[in-house]
């Protein structure tokens, strides 16, 4: 029987691309999803779907049946470490051999809440004895579509003049697919970045050029950003987590550029201008 690769978080920005990359490469792919009816519209008939949620351990057995490798994308919830570690334990019992975990840039070198959660889960994966690959990407270019898109021609962020080496989700997915299908990446850690560190002003100028309209950046005070997120209904724990990340980026602490993407997939990482052109309709 062909062993399968389980992709968790399969309908999200990264997981969806990972599942599609694996299927395109001919890998036996199973996508863990909350709603199979909705997910089927995204994936068509080429990818097996299974009901899955990190907070429901009853679903682990079926999701992990005949699975050899797992793409582990931890859920954003306050008990992330607890539920993710419980899943790793279930994977070990089920006979999984290799976990490719989506982590975060700065884990092990920076002190921030999300980083501590990822670090704890990385330690648990290591201690499980399973083969591992830890992917530590920088902020996604797709965040300018999903989380802080231009609103009425303005990007509002409390980043000052900070710069970050944004990485395209498609490159992260390509790296993950290689790691899941090539034993050479077992027990390795990769920091994934784009080819350049950009300020939000530079991002806005690129989007303006591509969209054919003026897009500007407004540096908002931290207190204003916090209040806006709370008024939008975000939980306080989540706001605290995001504000930590904003502060790190304001200080350009994640402006490092690595060669890991190119070395793994054999071509340069996608530049921000290419990303913007590919998604120009989102910015017009």
Image (spheres, helix red, strand yellow):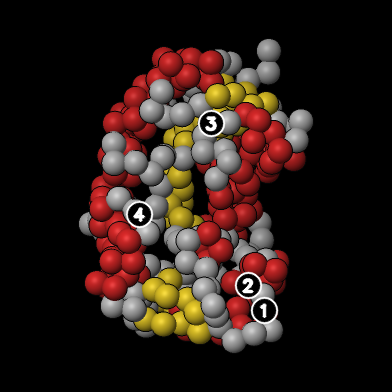
Mark pair 3, 1: CA separation = 35 Å
Give the residue pinned by disc 2: 283
Q: Which residue is mark 4?
A: 233
Determine whether the residue tagged by mark 1 lies in a helix, strand or loop. Answer: helix
Distance from Cα at disc 4 to Cα at disc 3: 23 Å
Question: Are circles 2 and 1 on residues that touch, CB within 8 Å?
Answer: yes
In this rendering, position of residue 269 left or right of residue 164: right
Residue at which label 1 appears: 211
Q: Position of residue 7 (x, y in %)?
A: 56, 34
Q: CA distance from mark 1 to mark 4?
A: 30 Å
Asked if the residues shown at circle 1 and circle 4 are in contact, with their CB atoms under 8 angstroms apart, the answer is: no
Residue at (27, 62) in percent of width and height = 244
Q: Is residue 30 above or below residue 208?
A: above
SS at badge 2: loop
Q: Quadrant of the C terminus?
A: bottom right
174 above or below 218?
Answer: above
**Comparing labels 1 and 4, the label whose residue is closer to the camera:** 4
Q: Which residue is mark 3?
A: 34
Q: Quadrant of the N terminus?
A: top right
């Amino acid at each position: 029987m062909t062993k399968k690769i389980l992709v968790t978080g399969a309908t999200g920005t990264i997981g969806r691309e990972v599942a599609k990359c694996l299927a395109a490469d001919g890998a036996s792919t199973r996508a863990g999803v909350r709603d199979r009816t909705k997910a089927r519209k995204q994936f068509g008939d080429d990818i097996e779907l299974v009901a899955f949620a990190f907070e429901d351990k009853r679903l682990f057995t079926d999701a992990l049946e005949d699975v050899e490798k797992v793409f582990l994308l931890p859920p954003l919830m306050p008990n992330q470490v607890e539920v993710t570690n419980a899943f790793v334990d279930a994977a070990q019992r089920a006979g999984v051999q290799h976990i490719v975990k989506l982590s975060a840039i700065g884990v092990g070198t920076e002190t921030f809440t999300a980083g501590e959660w990822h670090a704890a889960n990385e330690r648990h994966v290591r201690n499980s004895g399973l083969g591992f690959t830890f992917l530590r990407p920088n902020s996604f270019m797709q965040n300018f579509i999903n989380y802080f898109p231009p609103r009425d021609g303005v990007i509002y962020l409390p980043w000052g003049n900070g710069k970050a080496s944004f990485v395209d989700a498609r490159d992260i997915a390509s790296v993950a697919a290689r790691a899941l299908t090539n034993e050479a990446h077992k027990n390795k850690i990769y920091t994934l970045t784009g080819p350049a560190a950009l300020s939000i002003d530079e991002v806005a100028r690129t989007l303006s050029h591509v969209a054919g309209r003026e897009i500007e950046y407004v540096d908002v005070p931290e207190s204003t950003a916090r209040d806006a997120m709370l008024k939008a209904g975000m939980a306080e724990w989540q706001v605290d987590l995001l504000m930590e990340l904003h502060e790190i980026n304001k200080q350009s602490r994640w402006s490092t550029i690595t060669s890991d993407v190119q070395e793994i997939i054999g071509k340069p990482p996608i530049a921000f201008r290419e990303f913007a052109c590919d998604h120009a309709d989102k910015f017009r």
